[in-house]
Image (cartoon, rainbow, N blue to C red):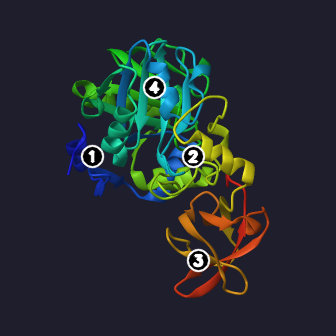
Amino acid sequence: MKTTALTDLHIALGAKMVPFAGYNMPVQYTGINDEHQTVRTGVGVFDVSHMGEFILKGERALELVQKISSNDASKLFDGKIQYACIPNETGGIVDDFLVYRIDAKTYLLVVNASNIQKDWDWISKYNTFGVEMKDISDKTSLFAVQGPKATEALQSLTSLDLGEMEYYTFKKGVFAGIDNVLISATGYTGAGGFEIYVDNEHAKEVWEAIMNAGKPFGIKPIGLGARDTLRLEMGFCLYGNDIDDTTSPLEAGLGWVTKFTKDFVNAENLKKQKEEGIQRKLVGFEMIERGIPRHGYELVNENDQPIGHVTSGTQSPTLQKSIGLGYLSKEYSKEGTEIYVKIRDKKVKAVVSKPPFIK
């Protein structure tokens, strides 16, 4: 199993460690519900250094990004970030990722930990543009500082004005005394905050500076368990659960990052799918009756006929009820439609509800 620069620190903090995407990662410290509430109401810090980072550099770097990305990266400017999919050749998704425009010839791609090698091979296959590619995943640490108090908690560590940073933008500068740190106004929680990219050699120093600066604001370390419940309350997709090599971006509700104004891998087939209409759709749902929906559970109608399956589900700590995401036949996908989750062969009632589950 791989480790991050701070694996030993998490163990010393008493974190429960689990294998995740080939890494030994902290799943929780004080408990998922407590950590979830910390992020929703205050500020918490996640070590998400298992994520992958690639640098694409060269005269034709944008052309390569445009070829492999569903979104239109020509709309980016220096300091702007874009969410997108990497479509495969058969209608599914290789990965979902972020594109950072450093400058006109340099882009940073942030990919999912479980897909680092797969994405690298895929992008390399399409690199007929002579673009220099560099995988900096193993030497880069990434901390997500999330919650409504994140700006206040971090501001003393940098002269950059964090409060004026717009969502999905980034800046580079001195942070916690370290030069050339990349700070982005992104996150996977819906609670606001920043993601801090730093070289592994400075990881411990930066982590400790964040914890010290955040002490007056009640900052706590947060594990991957709460990261999952937080993202699910927002209806954010998790690769391997809600999207994968068999799910189309249009089925997954990612038409908004699928732009047919330019050419990209499998664009023609996806465009055809859009014109003909999708047969199934990723929807959110809330449980009406007691029961927790889990990945892979069957979704049925009142006559017990299969109409889809659950991709993600949990007990929402904020709502105090169970919520989920799943693919449903189009005719059942309308908001307010009653459906059933098969839990241990029992039909448990739910209702289709449009994410985010917390407004």
The reply to whether dot 4 and dot 3 touch (C-beta < 8 Å) is no
Disc 4 from disc 3: Cα separation = 46 Å
The percent coordinates of residue 170 (x first, y second) are 51, 21
Q: Considering only order in the chain, which callout, 1 or 4, is on the residue closer to the N terminus?
A: 1
- In the image, which disc is placed on residue 40? 2
Q: Which residue is mark 1?
A: 10
Mark 3 packing: few (<14 Cα in 10 Å), some, or many (20+)?
many
Mark 2 packing: few (<14 Cα in 10 Å), some, or many (20+)?
many
Helix, strand or loop at mark 1 = helix
The percent coordinates of residue 36 (x first, y second) are 51, 52
Q: Which residue is mark 3?
A: 291
The reply to whether dot 2 and dot 1 touch (C-beta < 8 Å) is no
Q: Nearer the viewer, mark 2 or mark 4?
A: 4
* Amino acid at dot 2: Arg
Residue 245 left/right relative to 128: right
Residue 147 left/right relative to 333: left
Residue 201 picture quarter: top left
> In terms of depth relative to the viewer, which is nearer, 95 or 314?
95
